[in-house]
Amino acid sequence: MSLKTKVMVLPMSGLSKCMLLAAAAVLAPGAASAQVRPARPVAQPPGTAPRTGPAATQPGAPVPGNPDYKPPQPSDQLAPLPLPPAVWSTRDAQDLLATIGQIGAEGLDPADYDPAGLAAAISAGDPILLSKAATDRFDRVSWDLAMGHVRRAVRVDWYVTDNDIDAEKQDALMRSALATHQIGDALRSLLPTHPQYAALKAALASTPATDTAKLARIRLNMDRWRWLPRDLGQKYIIVNVPSFYATLVENGVNRWKNRAVAGKLSTPTPQLSATAVGVILNPWWEVPKSIEHEAAGKKGFVPVKAPDGSVQRWRQPPGPTNALGQIKFVMPNSQAIYLHDTNARSRFNSDVRALSHGCIRTMKIMDLATQLLGDDGGEWTPDKIQETLATKKTVQANFVKPVPVYIVYFSSAALLDGTIVNYQDLYGRDAKAMTALEMKDGGASLVPPKATKPPVPATDQVAAR
């Protein structure tokens, strides 16, 4: 039976106390798979164009603090010779079929992986047909468990880097699992390990099949956890926009948590990952072009002029009226989003705190920065920070170790006691993602094809240059 009509779940044990301690925050470290040469065309999520060669692997961030997705880079190295196709035994294929049958417990639909087609290949007794069918389904299942079923192209304002799996890692994982006859265990090793995911999974198992709206919401937010890296880091900051809270998590425990203000409906906060390398004390505010009209020519703003005297941009100097307050985090990213203080702290008293131009105004952010600057034997003591602030000079203070930052969008999450709480879908992002989750191709077919320019006739090519 399709998950669209009934969710099939497995019994599961209760959450441990230590898992629930971190449930209100938002992945415990997971082991990375070894890499070998691909034995087949580079695997892709369903509905996307095929890729070939090692250049298809997504590279990591080229510099610290700018981990947004980067397109594949050309390589001068010759592609390694492929390994022969993997050979599946009936036993391993049956393990894969059983795993697909149980995947409803993860909020996914078994029908999306064509279990009937795999069962037919098993019954046919043709090892070539069986191996091809099983490899195809292993690729699709492993991709969805590690990266999420909803395709990147239909995730609204999504700029998070996730390199948990690629074609080489898939191939290495599959061959290792075939060698040890542990297909199911290998696939389950890709699942998120964060307590929030476990709490949502438990809620999915206990929700009646008739409560379709609740099931859909839980399933979507489980998939959102798969959109994130499996290992968020030993210490990281996570901001859940719908909840309006920023949290510092270390070793799976909430170390610091406070209220936050996110983007208003007209300037929504994107979902992204970045690396905070330090903070700016007494920052200048560089007014974004999109809202420059709000500052141009007004008292308290300084123009930056070109040699010919024309105004290029506007800045606001440090001081009590500065929109960034006394401090902002240095966390470079393509969206120019960061955590910062504010000169309008009364806004933290509102229940719905969608009030900014997109950045995250963070309550008591100086306390957060002071803790991070003092970590790992850092030289920035509380006294030194206050002395620097008093000089009114703009100074960058760096952390000893950079800290990952994740700005996410979970409309359902778990409290410390495991209770699931729903937040307002501020930016209306749930509906499109839910639709994609219900589609076999994860919504890839929802993306309109890119328009291509007609070729320029040969007689017009010179004139077109």
Image (cartoon, rainbow, N blue to C red):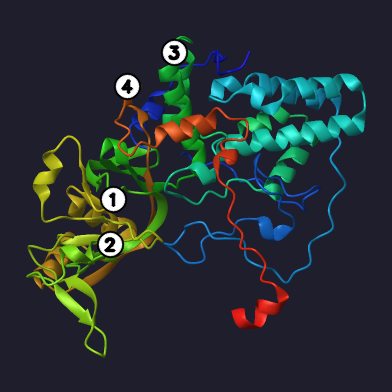
Name the amino acid type tagged 4.
Asp
Label 4: state its secondary structure: loop
Decide if residue 297 is on the left or right side of residue 460: left
Residue at 63% x, 39% y is 143
Decide if residue 279 is on the left or right side of residue 22: left
Query: Disc 2 or 4, which lies upstream in sequence?
Result: 2
Cα gap from disc 2 to disc 3, whole angstroms: 44 Å
Query: Disc 4 or 1, which lies upstream in sequence?
Result: 1
Name the amino acid type tagged 1.
Thr
Label 2: state its secondary structure: helix
Q: Is residue 145 visible?
A: yes
Cα gap from disc 2 to disc 4, whole angstroms: 42 Å
Label 3 Cα neighbours within 10 Å, binned few <14 / some 14-19 / many ≥20: some
Label 1 Cα neighbours within 10 Å, binned few <14 / some 14-19 / many ≥20: some
- According to the picture, the residue beneath numbered tag 4 turns out to be 417
Select label 3 or label 4 by which is in front.
3
The dot on residue 290 is 2
Cα gap from disc 3 to disc 4, whole angstroms: 17 Å
Label 1: state its secondary structure: loop
Residue at 28% x, 35% y is 243
Residue at 55% x, 44% y is 447
Looking at the image, do the residues carrying marks 1 and 2 touch, with CB atoms under 8 Å apart? Answer: yes
Query: Disc 3 or 4, which lies upstream in sequence?
Result: 3
Decide if residue 358 is on the left or right side of residue 20: left
Cα gap from disc 1 to disc 2, whole angstroms: 10 Å
- According to the picture, the residue beneath numbered tag 3 turns out to be 207
Q: Is residue 34 visible?
A: no
Query: Disc 1 or 2, which lies upstream in sequence?
Result: 1
The dot on residue 267 is 1
